[in-house]
């Protein structure tokens, strides 16, 4: 075995060009597969790490298949179903400044009952979990922090246990630190965990909005638990009248929660890298066949001297394993540095708003996958050469001489078929990349309905008992004071407050209006203060902006105006009535339309929905966004200045995210952006490998047919004829691959259609562009072999023969 290994290594040194090209080709395939697997692993393959008997309780409505939020009145009823449930835990996202050494470092924490983390199988790496009874007021001043928070804000010191931090108005003690890379299910992701203690407020029964986790009792099925919870007697407060009547309890497993991450996108990326890996293996197999043909005479001599065919196959397998191991080592470099660098260059790996669990890390699990790929690679590239060795004709191999030896028609067809498959896979990847490029171009053309340049949104939150919680005038005054503080920050040109109506990422039409001909028109309702429209750059189409704080006037957007009054050019002065109200009532007939506002998009993909915009004094609890018009695009300096000024003004004001609107478009497209970047990189590498495959086939074919070309020229063929012959061979292979690849792209288009926008999965322009690109690059790859064939030296060839 050692002598065989020494022979293999000496052979690779003698054939450095072959060794380098093969190792680089396989390293690209293995490394890209490892990098993409590291991203898709959590969403696709590790969803079963949580206990299978733990579920999130939600509700189903006619409009929503699953609503994860529950309220205190519901959970109190669920707690009575002890026969179906072994445990019930609650989690609430809580808002407040988290302060260390006098500086705010976070803007909230997750309040959990002490049993939630153990129920999910989450145990602190250092310290302890929460104790029973610590979810009572006065005893809940303890926190568990994530590994990331521990490193960033507590110095990564082991003596961080016992450290005091301020969470809201409480001084809390750090009692536990989670392990590095601790994965948490959706709705329970956070940096800080604190025991949940709250008092239900009968005047505001919708506070807090909770996530309810249950562990089923032994022997109880999911369907039985759902039936039991649906039978629980929930006493809905009067404030929920008409709001939660259609709610039906539904359970979601923790694995199903990952659907919010759109797993189809990750399957697409995994399939794409599978095509690239296949192209790399096909290319390497072709190169191995080329090398074996060049060694045909040597192999026959070794067989004639007593070397068995099994020994030759063993030697060949050793070569393939050695190449695959070298490629795996190179693949680690590709996965850890090169591939993330390429994605970063295309905007994918650091996409704005991408979830925190997307990271390029090579842990033991990823290295294990790459080890499996190494074994598969060595097997894949050895199969065809091994079969050729077993079928080698000893006599013909010894009789054939040197450069006159050519490959058989069957072997030529086999190597050509490998190139055709490479071209087909490359077409599929190129088509996917082309569709995503067109999709992004279409997204950039969307009119958002406001001027997003130099505009930022500042999300603020207030404690439940903050100033004016039950006094709208006091709350309105405080909002205006905050507005004035923001206006004093250098670089701020205009500022206004209101609900989050500028591309919030969601649209909830909770208002039912009386429409024409007795039909119902659904609409959302939001309010904003005077000055908001100037800072945001909203467009008034008819009428005037709201002037009277407590008037009965409202604004409607264009979409709602068309739905309610399709035949009215200017609906100013029309009456908007909630469904079920009496149009003939003497005390209140409805709201008067003061003006029509241009449509503003709530999401990128959906058309603008219906909206009523109310005066600034209505529903001030939803006024949690300040829009800020700046003199330049938002930068970290301005963000820090805004946070410092508001914290100095009032430490109870919690400044959440500060988002530049020019980038929020990309935030909502992070999934498409990641898919776009991955496909572009994979398609580029696939195109490069395919061109290399075409070049290798033609270069070897020309080298083996030089004697034939000399004979052709002796009988009158011109150099142009020989060049045309070689080009025709290459174009024929590419055309065959194009045909097969386009058919495959059309068949697979339905799997990427959900990612596309404004373009069909079978877009003819994309397919035509892909075909033209592949043909152009193939012709370029054929140019050098064709040129070499045209320069055949007839006299030298005849002398050698």
Image: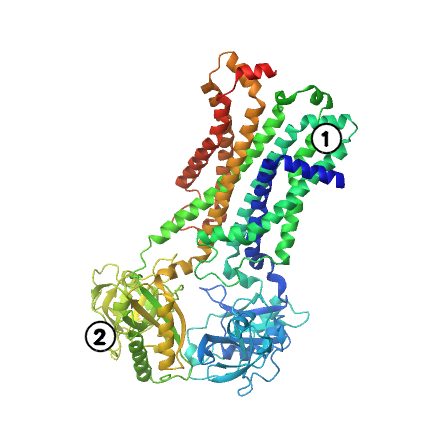
Mark 1 vs mark 2: which is more N-terminal?
A: 1
Q: Where is residue 437 in the image (x, y as percent from the top left)?
A: 41, 47
Residue at 43 percent of width and 34 percent of height: 776
Crowding at mark 2 (Cα within 10 Å: few <14, some 14-19, many 20+): few
Query: Which numbered tag is attached to residue 547?
Result: 2
Between residues 395 and 614, which one lies in front from this camera angle? 395
Q: In this view, does 188 lie to the left or right of 314?
A: left
Residue at 36 percent of width and 50 percent of height: 442
Q: Would you place residue 275 above or below residue 157 in this image?
A: above
- Would residue 603 be seen by someone viewing this image from the given angle? no
Question: Mark 2: which secondary structure?
Answer: loop
Q: Where is residue 492 in the image (x, y as percent from the top left)?
A: 29, 70
Instruction: Name the residue carrying label 1.
Output: 390
Q: Would you place residue 59 above or below residue 680 in this image?
A: below
Observer-side mark, 1 or 2, equals 1
Task: State which quarter of the image contains the N terminus.
Answer: top right
Residue at 50 percent of width and 84 percent of height: 171
- Residue 385: quadrant of the picture: top right
- Residue 395: quadrant of the picture: top right
Q: Which residue is outermost to the right?
A: 306
Whole-number angstrom distance, CA of label 1 to CA of label 2 = 90 Å
């Amino acid at each position: 075995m050692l002598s065989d290994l020494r022979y293999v290594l000496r052979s690779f040194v003698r054939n450095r060009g072959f060794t380098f090209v093969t190792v680089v080709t396989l390293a690209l395939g293995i490394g890209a597969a490892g990098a993409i697997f590291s991203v898709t692993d959590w969403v696709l393959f590790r969803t079963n790490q949580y206990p299978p008997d733990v579920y999130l309780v939600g509700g189903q409505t006619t409009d929503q298949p699953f609503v994860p939020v529950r309220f205190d009145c519901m959970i109190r009823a669920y707690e009575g179903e002890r026969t179906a449930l072994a445990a019930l835990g609650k989690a609430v996202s809580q808002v407040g400044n988290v302060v260390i050494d006098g500086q705010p470092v976070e803007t909230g924490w997750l309040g959990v009952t002490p049993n939630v983390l153990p129920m999910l199988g989450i145990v602190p790496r250092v310290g302890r979990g929460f104790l029973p009874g610590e979810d009572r007021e006065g005893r809940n001043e303890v926190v568990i922090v994530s590994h990331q928070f521990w490193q960033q804000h507590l110095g990564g010191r082991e003596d961080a246990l016992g450290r005091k931090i301020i969470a809201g108005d409480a001084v809390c003690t750090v009692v536990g630190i989670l392990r590095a890379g601790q994965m948490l299910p959706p709705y329970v992701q956070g940096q800080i965990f604190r025991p949940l203690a709250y008092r239900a407020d009968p005047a505001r029964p919708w506070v807090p909005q909770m996530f309810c986790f249950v562990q089923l009792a032994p022997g109880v099925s999911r369907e039985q638990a759902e039936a039991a919870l649906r039978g629980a007697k929930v006493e809905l407060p009067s404030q929920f009248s008409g709001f939660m009547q259609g709610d039906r309890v539904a359970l979601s497993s923790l694995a199903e929660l990952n659907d919010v991450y759109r797993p189809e996108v990750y399957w697409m990326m995994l399939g794409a890298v599978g095509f690239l890996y296949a192209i790399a293996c096909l290319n390497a197999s072709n190169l191995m066949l080329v090398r074996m043909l060049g060694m045909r005479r040597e192999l026959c001599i070794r067989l004639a001297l007593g070397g068995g065919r099994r020994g030759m196959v063993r030697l060949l397998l050793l070569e393939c394993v050695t190449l695959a191991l070298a490629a795996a080592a190179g693949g680690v470099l590709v996965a850890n540095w090169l591939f993330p660098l390429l994605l970063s260059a295309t905007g994918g790996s650091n996409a704005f708003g991408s979830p925190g669990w997307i990271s390029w890390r090579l842990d033991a699990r990823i290295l294990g996958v790459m080890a499996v790929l190494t074994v598969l690679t060595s097997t894949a590239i050895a199969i065809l050469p091994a079969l050729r060795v077993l079928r080698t004709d000893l006599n013909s191999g010894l009789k054939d001489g040197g450069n006159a030896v050519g490959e058989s028609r069957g072997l030529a067809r086999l190597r050509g078929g490998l190139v055709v498959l490479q071209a087909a896979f490359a077409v599929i990847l190129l088509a996917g990349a082309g569709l995503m490029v067109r999709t992004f171009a279409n997204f950039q053309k969307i009119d958002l309905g406001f001027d997003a340049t130099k505009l930022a949104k500042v999300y603020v939150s207030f404690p439940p008992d903050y100033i004016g919680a039950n006094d709208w005038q006091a709350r309105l005054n405080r909002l205006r004071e905050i507005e004035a503080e923001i206006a004093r920050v250098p670089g701020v040109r205009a500022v206004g407050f209101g609900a989050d109506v500028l591309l919030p990422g969601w649209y909830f039409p909770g208002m039912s209006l009386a429409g024409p001909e007795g039909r119902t028109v659904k609409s959302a309702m939001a309010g904003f203060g005077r000055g908001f429209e100037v800072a945001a750059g909203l467009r008034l189409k008819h009428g005037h902006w709201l002037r009277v704080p407590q008037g009965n006037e409202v604004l409607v957007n264009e979409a709602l105006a068309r739905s309610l009054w399709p035949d009215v050019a200017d609906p100013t002065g029309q009456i908007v009535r909630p469904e079920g109200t009496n149009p003939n009532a003497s005390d209140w007939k409805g709201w008067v339309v003061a003006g029509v506002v241009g449509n503003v998009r709530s999401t990128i993909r959906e058309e603008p929905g219906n909206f009523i915009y109310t005066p600034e004094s209505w529903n001030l609890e939803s006024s949690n966004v300040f829009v800020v018009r700046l003199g330049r695009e938002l930068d970290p300096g301005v963000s820090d200045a805004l946070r410092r000024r508001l914290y100095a003004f009032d430490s109870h004001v919690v400044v959440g995210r500060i988002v530049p609107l020019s980038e929020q478009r990309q935030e909502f497209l992070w999934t498409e952006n990641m898919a776009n970047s991955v496909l572009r990189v994979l398609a580029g590498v696939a195109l490069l490998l395919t061109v290399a495959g075409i070049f290798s086939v033609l270069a070897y074919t020309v080298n083996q047919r030089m004697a034939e070309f000399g004979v052709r020229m002796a009988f009158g063929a011109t150099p142009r004829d020989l060049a045309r012959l070689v080009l025709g061979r290459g174009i024929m292979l590419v055309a065959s691959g194009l045909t097969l690849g386009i058919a495959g792209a059309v068949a697979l288009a339905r799997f990427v259609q959900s990612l596309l926008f404004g373009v069909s999965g079978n877009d003819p322009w994309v397919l035509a562009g892909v075909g033209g690109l592949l043909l152009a690059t193939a012709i370029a790859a054929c140019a050098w072999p064709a040129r070499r064939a045209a320069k055949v030296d007839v006299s030298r060839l005849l002398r050698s023969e």
